Amino acid sequence: MIIVKKVIIRPWLKYFAFTSLLLYLLVLSGSLVLDLLRSNVTTAEVFINQALNTPNTLIRILPLACLLCSLVTLNGLIQSNELTAIFSLGFSREKVLYNILYVTAIVSFSHFLISSYLKPFSLRAKNKIIPNLDKKFSSLKKQGLITSKISNGKMWFKSNEYFFSYSTFNDRVNEISNTTIYHHTNDFKLKSLYLSPKTKSNSENKWESDSLTTVSNLNTNESNSVTNKKKSSLNILREGPKDFGQIEQDITTLNFIELLQYIKKLNHAGVSSIKYEVIILKIISGASSCILFTLLGTIILFSPNKRSFSLGKIIGICLSFTLCYWLVEGYLIELAITEKINTYIGVFGFQIFLSLSLLFYYQRNRSLR
C-alpha cells in the first residue's frame, strides 16, 4: 500500500492539481478576453464575475482533469517500467485501479458539493454584487433553464400561495404574456385559476389585465364560477417587474436540498417538474463522470501490449472524447427536457453505455492475461 501511494497516488494527485490549474487558466483567459470586450461592463465587474463563476468552471474541468491525469500518470509509469515493477511485487491491476478510484471518489464528492452548494451560492452572490447581471452578461445568464423555456414555452414559479407560469416578460414596458396563476390552499388544493393573455404593470407597480378570466370554487362542491373581465386589476400577483428578471435565476440558485423540496411541492400540486428533475440528475451525473473518466483513463492497465503514448496523442484523445461526450450528453438532456425520452435515460444514457463498454473491455482483456 505504501508503494502504491508513493509511485501511483502521489503522481496522480500532482498531475491532477497541475492539469486542473492549467485547464482553469485556459478557460479563464478565454472568458476574460470575451468579457473585457463588452462595452457595458467595468473591469472590476468582469473580474468579480469570473471569480464567482469559478465553481461553474470547476464543474466542467474536473472530469477532464481526472481523465488526463490518469492517462499521463499510468503512461509515465509504463515508460519508466515502474508499473511492471509494481506488478512483480504482487500488486494486481485491480488493486492499483481500486486505489486510484479511492482518490477519485474524493474528487467526485467534491464535484457534488461544488455543484449542489457552492455554485448556487456564487450565483446568488453574483446577482447581489453585480447590478443588472442578466443584461451585462447575457450569454452567461439562466444557463440551467433557458433551453427548457424555449422548448415548452413556459416558465414556472412558486410563490407562497400560488404557482404561476408565463411565456415572456418585456422589461421595457413591464408586460408579461400568457400568464396563468394557480391559487391553492395550504394543503395544495387548487382554489382558483386566473388566465390573462397580457398583463402590464401600471405607474403604481400594480398589475392590470386587458382580458382576465377567473375560475373560482375549484376546491368546493359548488359549481365552478367563471368570470371574464376587461381592464381588471390582477391583485393576487404580488411579484413586481424587478422580480421577473430574477425568477429564472432564482431556480438555479437553489441548493440541492432546496431544489428537492421545490420539486416535491411541484409534484404535490400536479405541476410538471421534468426540467427541474433534470437539474438534480445532472448534479449526480456530473459527480459520477469524474469516476467514469478516471476508469476510461486506466484502460491501459488492462491493455494487452501496454505501450506508452506521446503527450500530444493523450491530449488529443482526451479533448476529442470530452467534446463528443458533451455533445451527446447535451443532446440527450434536451430530449429528456422535452419529454421525448425517459429522464434517466437522457441524463445517464451515455454514461451507462460507456460503463458497459468499459466493463466489456476489462473483462475481455482480463481473460487474455
Image (tube, grey):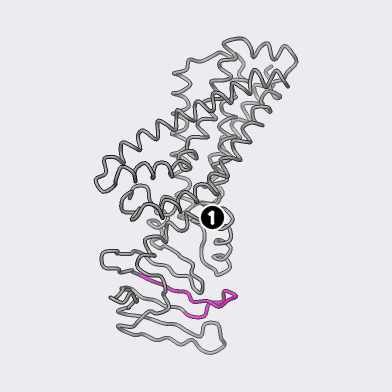
Across and down, in percent, residue 176 comes to: 33, 68
Region of the chain picked out in magenta, as a range: 178-192
Membership of 188 in magenta stretch: yes
Residue at 41% from the left image edge and 82% from the top image edge:
214
Q: Which residue is mark 1?
A: 277
Residue at 37% from the left image edge and 47% from the top image edge:
140
Across and down, in percent, residue 27 comes to: 40, 34
For this view, does 150 lie left or right of residue 191?
Answer: left
Membership of 360 in magenta stretch: no
When asked about the image quadrant of residue 193, the answer is bottom left
Residue 244 visible, this orientation:
yes
Chief SS of the magenta region: strand
Across and down, in percent, residue 154 comes to: 40, 63
Across and down, in percent, residue 9 comes to: 63, 23
Name of the residue lying farthest toward the right: 90
Residue 282 visible, this orientation:
no
